[in-house]
Amino acid sequence: MTLGYDRPLYVLPFDHRATFSKNVFGWTGPLGPEQTAAIVALKQVIYDAFLAALAGGVPKDRAGVLVDEQFGAAILRDAVRRGIVTACTVEKSGQDEFDFEYGADFARHLDAVGPTFAKVLVRYNPEGDRALNRRQAARLRRLSDYLHGSGRLFMFELLVPALPAQLERLGSDRRAYDRELRPALMIRAIRELHEAGVEPDVWKIEGNDSRADAGKVVAAAREGGREAVGCIILGRGEDDAKVREWLTTAAGVPGFIGFAVGRTAFWRPLQSHRAGEITRAAAVAEIAASYREWVDLFETAKRGAPTAEVAT
């Protein structure tokens, strides 16, 4: 059914595009060559930090980078040449409905950079617009079929944003939504996507506050003969304390093979570097140290977790 991927996987994601253009530089609209070059250079800082972390002891066979083709094609090619696990984003940036960045030409673009994984970010709330969900699922099925037919792996970043009515039931408390509603909605979304023929090898998902909820998410991802499918925790741009909580919880659950934490690691040092407050070398060192810290945290928590069966 799926190829699956259940080896440890610690991803440094920096596939952000609209975020870099708008939130880092304040740019909107089409970019000129100089603007594009500035973003490429900033992403190279992050990649250099990743390589520094590998040189500092992060196991290469457990490490990976997630970056976009638009600003990171050279990074992807270099990482592939070095034998590093790579993931390349496929979706258009900054829109609520999933569609392909390069339309029907997505396969040729993937072949050009040769990543280990094709990655999509999808916003899918099972209580939301049914027609929108069906359109997304149809496009995702097309991608899923292509990837598994070509032997390339599929990484699916699932976001389940709260609907206004869902938040209203909880007094507009987003933390309560994360805790009380989102876990069950994630499970429903995974099952609906499976039913639509969408078969990720790795689910990149928002964290859960409880180990029991995390176990139920893994069970949904692996049900129906999908035992080799892995789950990784994303950072969602949360603060350091929340990311630590999510990683520690996930590490104790069989089936969670790692994480993908980006902005929490690189945002502050990149901004400080652009403001002239720290050197490029200092930014590289700080990002590398943060990434290494997430790896150490996850591995320490996993070693210390009691053995348990995945929840059903």
Image: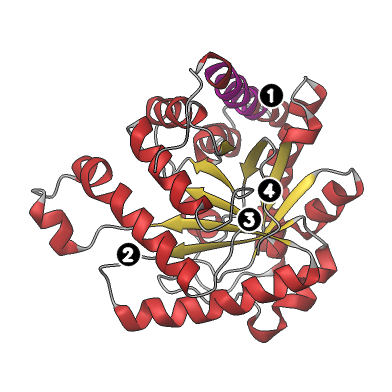
Residue at (27, 71) in percent of width and height:
128
Mark 2 crowd level (few <14, some 14–19, many ≥20, 10 Å Cα): many
Q: Earlier in the sequence, mark 4 or mark 2?
A: 4
Coordinates of residue 192 in the picture (x, y in percent): 41, 68
Which is nearer the eye, 273 or 238? Answer: 238
State how far apart marks 3 and 1 are (Cα): 32 Å
Label 1: state its secondary structure.
helix
Q: Which residue is identified by label 3? A: 201
Q: Earlier in the sequence, mark 2 or mark 1?
A: 2
Label 2: state its secondary structure.
loop
Mark in front: 1 vs 4? 4
Mark in front: 2 vs 1? 2
State how far apart marks 4 and 3 are (Cα): 6 Å
Q: Earlier in the sequence, mark 4 or mark 3?
A: 4
Tell me the amino acid under the disc marked 3: Asp
State how far apart marks 2 and 3 are (Cα): 21 Å
Mark carried by residue 5:
4
Q: Are marks 4 and 3 in contact (CB under 8 Å)?
A: yes
Coordinates of residue 76 in the picture (x, y in percent): 79, 54
Label 3: state its secondary structure.
loop
Span shown in magenta: 286-301
Q: Examine the rendering and report whether any part of residue 34 can be seen.
A: no
Q: Earlier in the sequence, mark 2 or mark 3?
A: 2
Q: Which residue is identified by label 2? A: 125
Q: Which residue is identified by label 1? A: 285
Residue at (53, 51) in percent of width and height:
222
Which is nearer the eye, 300 or 243? Answer: 300
